[in-house]
Image (spheres, grey):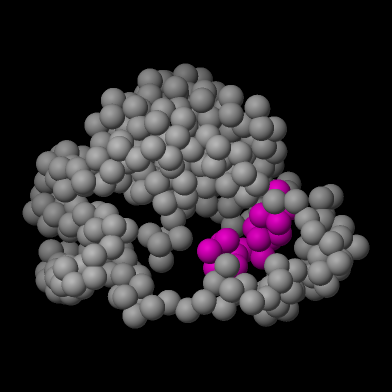
C-alpha cells in the first residue's frame, strides 16, 4: 500500500503532468513537493482539489493507493452496470436478463445485503426500460415499478445510523420514491448521518446525496420540494463554510428560479460557469455547460448521480 502522496505522484507522472501545472493559490509548489515525498499532509479540501486537477475520482484513487483488485463477482456486477447503460432497444434486454439471472443465482448461494439491494435496483431499471421501449412514458414507468425497491426503502427507514452505504443507497433508490417520502427520507438522512458527515472527508458524499435528491425533485417538477432542498443545502454550506460547494450554489439557485418561471435564471447559472472557468476546472465546466442547456431546453430527463459503481 502506497502513501497518499506517493500515489498522487504516480498518478501525476502517468498523466505526463509537471508538478508546476497543478500549482494554484491553494496548492503551492513547495506544499505539493513535500506532500508527494511524505514530508507533510494536506487538508481534505486541498486533497479533493488535487484530485479534481488530476481528473481522478476518489474511488479510483483508493484502488491505486491500496492495490486492491476486484473479485470475480464485483467484476460481474460492474459488467452488468456497463450493460445497463448501453441498452438502446427492447431486443438487447435479453442479454441483460441473462446477466441478471446469473447474479440472482449467486445471491441465493452467497447472500449479501448490498447485492440484494443492487438486484432490486437492477430489476427496477430492467422493468422500466422494457415498458419505456414499448411506449410508456418514463415517469409513468417509474411510478409503475417503484415497488421493486420497497425492500431497500424499508431498510433505509429502519436503519438507526447512516454512513457511506446508506447515503449511496438513498441516492440510488430515491428516484422510485414519491415526493413526500423522498423529502421525509432526506430529513432522516440529515439526522442519522449528522455525526458521520462531520468527519473530515465525508462532507463530499453528503453533498453528492443532496445533489442527487435535488435533481430528482427537478425531474419530477416538484418545484417546492426542489426549492426547500436548495435552501437546506445553502444553509448547510454556509454553516460549514464549504468553499468548493459554494461555487455551485448559483447554478442550482438558477435552476430553482427557472422551475418557478422567475427572471434571471440563466444569469445565476452563468455565475457558476464563470467561476469554474476562472478556477480552471475544465471538466466540470463542460459538464455544467451541458447541464445548463438540458435544463433551459426542458430536456433534463435523468438525475445527477455521482456514484462510483453506477458511473461505470
Q: Quadrant of residue 94?
A: bottom left
Q: Specify the quadrant that holds the C terminus.
A: bottom left
Say which residue appears at 42% left-offset and 51% top-offset.
165
State the image coordinates of residue 275 (x, y, percent, origin top left). 69, 42
Residue that extends furthest to the left in the rendered view of this protein: 134
Q: Quadrant of residue 129?
A: bottom left
Q: Is residue 281 left or right of residue 292?
A: right
Residue 308 drawn in magenta: no
Residue 170 appears in view: yes
Q: What's the magenta bit mostly, secondary-structure-wise?
A: helix
Say which residue appears at 52% left-offset and 52% top-offset.
287
Q: Specify the quadrant that holds the N terminus.
A: bottom right
In front of the other: 178 or 223: 178
In front of the other: 266 or 82: 82
Residue 51 drawn in magenta: yes
State the image coordinates of residue 268 (x, y, percent, origin top left). 58, 30
Say which residue appears at 31% left-offset and 70% top-offset.
77
Q: Is residue 14 above or below residue 126?
A: below
Residue that extends furthest to the front in the rendered view of this protein: 160
Residue 118 appears in view: no
Q: Is residue 301 above or below residue 179?
A: below
Q: How many marks?
A: 0
Say which residue appears at 35% left-offset and 40% top-offset.
159
Q: Is residue 1 above or below residue 286?
A: below
* Span highlighted in magenta in the image: 45-61
State the image coordinates of residue 13 (x, y, percent, origin top left). 73, 78
Q: Is residue 205 above or below residue 241?
A: below
Q: Is residue 203 left or right of residue 96?
A: right
State the image coordinates of residue 173 (x, y, percent, origin top left). 30, 46
Amino acid at each position: 500500500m502506497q502513501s497518499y502522496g506517493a500515489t498522487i505522484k504516480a498518478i501525476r507522472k502517468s498523466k505526463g503532468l509537471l508538478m508546476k501545472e497543478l500549482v494554484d493559490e491553494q496548492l503551492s509548489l513547495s506544499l505539493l513537493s513535500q506532500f508527494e515525498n511524505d514530508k507533510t499532509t494536506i487538508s481534505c479540501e486541498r486533497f479533493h482539489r488535487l484530485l479534481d486537477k488530476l481528473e481522478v475520482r476518489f474511488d479510483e484513487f483508493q484502488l491505486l493507493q491500496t492495490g486492491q483488485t476486484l473479485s470475480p463477482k464485483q467484476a460481474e456486477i460492474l459488467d452488468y452496470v456497463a450493460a445497463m447503460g448501453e441498452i438502446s432497444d427492447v431486443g438487447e434486454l435479453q442479454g441483460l436478463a441473462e446477466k441478471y439471472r446469473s447474479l440472482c443465482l449467486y445471491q441465493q448461494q452467497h447472500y449479501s445485503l448490498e447485492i440484494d439491494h443492487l438486484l432490486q435496483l437492477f430489476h427496477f431499471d430492467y422493468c422500466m426500460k422494457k415498458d419505456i421501449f414499448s411506449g410508456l412514458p418514463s415517469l409513468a414507468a417509474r411510478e409503475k415499478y417503484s415497488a421493486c425497491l420497497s425492500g431497500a426503502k424499508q431498510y433505509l427507514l429502519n436503519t438507526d445510523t447512516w454512513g457511506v452505504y446508506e447515503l449511496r443507497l438513498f441516492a440510488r433508490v430515491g428516484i422510485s420514491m414519491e415526493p413526500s417520502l423522498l423529502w421525509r427520507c432526506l430529513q432522516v438522512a440529515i439526522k442519522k448521518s449528522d455525526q458521520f458527515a462531520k468527519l473530515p472527508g465525508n462532507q463530499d458524499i453528503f453533498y453528492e446525496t443532496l445533489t442527487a435528491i435535488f435533481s430528482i425533485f427537478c425531474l419530477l417538477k416538484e418545484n417546492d420540494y426542489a426549492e426547500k432542498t436548495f435552501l437546506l443545502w445553502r444553509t448547510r454550506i454556509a454553516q460549514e463554510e464549504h468553499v468548493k460547494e459554494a461555487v455551485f450554489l448559483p447554478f442550482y439557485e438558477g435552476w430553482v428560479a427557472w422551475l418557478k418561471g422567475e427572471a434571471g435564471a440563466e444569469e445565476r447559472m452563468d455565475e457558476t460557469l464563470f467561476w469554474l472557468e476562472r478556477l480552471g476546472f475544465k471538466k466540470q465546466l463542460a459538464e455544467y455547460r451541458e447541464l445548463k442547456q438540458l435544463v433551459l431546453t426542458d430536456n433534463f430527463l435523468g438525475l445527477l448521480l455521482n456514484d462510483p459503481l453506477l458511473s461505470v
